[in-house]
Image (spheres, grey):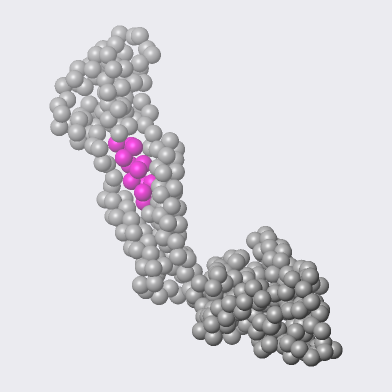
Amino acid sequence: MQQTWINDYRKRLVREKIVTSLAFGLMVGAGADFLAALACYLFNFKGIWLPLTIGGGVFLLSSVLFYFLKFRPTERDVVRRVDTMGLDERAVTMYELKDEDSFIAKRQREDAVEKVAAVNKEQVKRAFPLFALKTWAVILLFTVFLSGAGMTTVAGLAGAGVIDSPDILPDKDRENFCIVSYLTEGQGDVEGEPEQTILAGEDATTVVAVADDGWMFTKWSDGVKDPARTDRKILEDLSVTAIFEEIAESSEDIDGEAGGDAEDGDADKNAPSDNNDSSAPAGDSGQGGEGDGNGDKGDGSGSGNGGQEGEGKGNGKGEGAGGGWSDGNQIIDGKTDYRDVRDLYYDQAMEIIRNGGELPDYLREFIEQYYGSI
């Protein structure tokens, strides 16, 4: 019987002490939040999550510590609280004599049990309230909580740029970061890292402006004409734009190409056979050759662009060799196209840039010369 009512009142006291521990934990957590928010405001740290995280963690940890180290109730605490309901220390005496079996001890326990059973609900509520903080603790709790909430609000507004931060950290102790942005205007891309965040004074990684089909790179917005660039010793934010222009085909180029195709067709139709000693008048795509005799038929050797029928003297026998043509005359040693070499070097350069490396001098020189010749 004795142990039963002690357990019942113990549950009430445990609830009260848990609430008290949470209140004191909130007090300490709010104080930690205030200090963290103040530091963020003074040092211009734009992260409101930091004081909230610190305050929440300190609140949980301190609440647990307060309960187990200070407020956790024992059976003696329970019987002392029971005595406040008008039992005049009967509960404490009963608890102290619980192991004795004398007549006096038995009579004392019976008397205490009768008095405990006679208490009413109002007495129990007054003796075991859910919220039992003293006035000074309540005032301190609200003061610290409002201070922490207010300082967190100020730090958040400063981080959002609504209000200014004093920013008291000396420049020599600050790590400044610079943002480097490479943008495009027109049809083209920037190979490498278009957006880079680096420490002030460091070099940016190499990027290359590459135009799409039908477009050409002209320059960067800061006047640099080399499509490949490596900005060094950046001290402030940098933003440059790669400018691409569309390659326009003039009407003369179109007419010239059409005329050339027609003349090539006429020349094929009038080409002499290998077994014929004479040749028909040459087309417009060659200049006349030279011969030994008089007549309309020259031996026709020669090359060139445009021309009338060849005038020659001779018997008209000979081989005619028309002028050859290649795409932009970009020929190395008569066999290898410049563009093939450029593609090989370009692929090597892109692979190095993607891996964060530095371009070798021979690759950089080749790419610069190639784009400079366009």
Q: Tell me if I can see residue 295 in this picture.
A: yes
- Quarter assignment of residue 94: top left
Residue at screen point 36% across, 49% down? 26
Residue 62 placed where, x, y %? 43, 45
Residue situated in front as seen by the camera: 281 or 353: 281
Q: Looking at the picture, does residue 81 appear above or below residue 131?
A: above
- Quarter assignment of residue 362: bottom right
Q: Looking at the picture, does residue 244 appear above or below residue 51?
A: below
**Number of numbered callouts drawn:** 0
Q: Tell me if I can see residue 177 in this picture.
A: no
Residue situated in front as seen by the camera: 105 or 53: 53
Q: Looking at the picture, does residue 249 appear above or below residue 5?
A: below
Residue at screen point 68% across, 63% down? 347
Residue at screen point 68% across, 87% down? 309
Q: Which residues are magenta?
A: 16-28
Residue situated in front as seen by the camera: 53 or 274: 274
Task: State the predominant SS element of the stretch in magenta.
Answer: helix
Residue 178 placed where, x, y %? 56, 72
Residue 231 as seen in the image, left or right of residue 152: right
Magenta includes 23?
yes
- Quarter assignment of residue 88: top left
Residue 85 as seen in the image, left or right of residue 69: left
Extreme-right residue of the structure: 292
Residue 372 placed where, x, y %? 67, 81
Which corner quadrant holds the N terminus? Answer: top left
Which corner quadrant holds the C terminus? Answer: bottom right
Residue at screen point 72% across, 64% down? 344
Residue situated in front as seen by the camera: 242 or 195: 242
Magenta includes 288?
no
Residue 268 placed where, x, y %? 66, 73
Residue 229 as seen in the image, left or right of residue 48: right
